[in-house]
Image (cartoon, coloured by chain):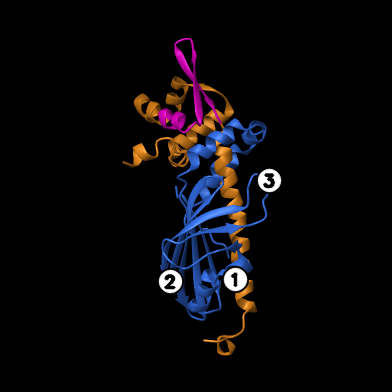
Chain colours: A orange, B blue
Amino acid sequence: MFDDLERADVFRAVADPTRRAMLELLRETDRSVNELVERFPVSQPAISRHLRVLREAGLVRPRKAGRQRVYTLEAGPLQEVYDWVEHYRRFWPRRLKALGEYLDRQPEPRSEEA
Amino acid sequence: MSRTLTFEAFYPHPPDRVWRALTDRRAISEWLMENDFEPRVGHRFQFRAPPQPGWNGIVDCQVLEADPPRRLAYSWVSNAIDTRVAWTLTPEAGGTRLRLEHSGFRGLKGYMVSFILGSGWKGKILKEIARVLDELDRIAPATGAQ
């Protein structure tokens, strides 16, 4: 199933708006599970599931702080996604333009062989 | 969220000519990269460009679809990121609309690990996070190239 195949997939992890909002909150500062639960109109089990997806994608790291688990943002995977996206967002428009220029340089069909 | 980068362009040339530019080895080298392409499903080939820091300049590919002059798709594996490039040609008045979809990230995990193990990413990344999230929101279908 989709879930199993892509469990550690950072793209899937950030596809969900709640998880993106959680990452935004963790960008400001480390937060405990309770602090995260307070911020969202969903149950604690739902938040825990989201945290599990984020953890398995390598986007957050938990640590024990007394009786609490506190989560820290791990940004490395996002950098990789960002670099990939940025590279091809620049690459393809340039290549499509070059394709157009190549086509315009070619002789008209009449004068072409076959 | 879409996992696909999509671009579109219009060319004032008929689909047959655009198809030839997409599938003729010499033509492809003029606008994309040196290659040993053949428009035959199953054919394995490479694109080659001068190596750059962080990239050996090689893209490993295999033809997945070749339906002239409408649709062409090949796998696109570069830097251990396994993706797929698909071209769709649609005739329009006065020319051809070309749609390009670049999708799929199957090999990402392994690459992520080596990336994270590398040094120097941490300082830069924290500043970029917000932009990354915005970017991912924006990559919906029909990101126009034209």
Amino acid type for the residue under numbered disc 1: Arg
For marks 1 and 2, the one nearer the N-term is 1
Residue, disc 2: B70
Badge nearest the viewer, 1 or 3? 1
Residue A40 visible to the viewer: no
**Residue in view at x 56 percent, y 48 percent:** A85
- Report in which chain the residue with disc 2 lies: B
For marks 1 and 3, the one nearer the N-term is 1
Q: Secondary structure at mark 1?
A: helix
Near mark 1 (Cα within 10 A), the count class, few <14, some 14-19 or many ≥20, is: some
Q: Is residue A9 above or below residue B101?
A: above
Residue, disc 1: B26
**Residue in view at x 64 percent, y 72 percent:** A101
Q: Position of residue B66 (x, y in %)?
A: 42, 67
Badge nearest the viewer, 1 or 2? 1
- Report in which chain the residue with disc 3 lies: B
**Residue B10 on the magenta segment:** no
- Cα gap from disc 3 to disc 2, whole angstroms: 36 Å
Amino acid type for the residue under numbered disc 2: Arg
**Residue A63 on the magenta segment:** yes
**Label 3 with label 2: CB-CB less than 8 Å:** no
Badge nearest the viewer, 3 or 2? 3
- Cα gap from disc 1 to disc 3, whole angstroms: 27 Å
Q: Position of residue B78 (x, y in %)?
A: 55, 49
Near mark 2 (Cα within 10 A), the count class, few <14, some 14-19 or many ≥20, is: some
Residue, disc 3: B53
- Report in which chain the residue with disc 1 lies: B
Q: Secondary structure at mark 2?
A: loop
Q: Position of residue B31 (x, y in %)?
A: 62, 67
Which residues, given as a range, are shown in magenta?
A51-74
Tags 1 and 2 on a common chain = yes
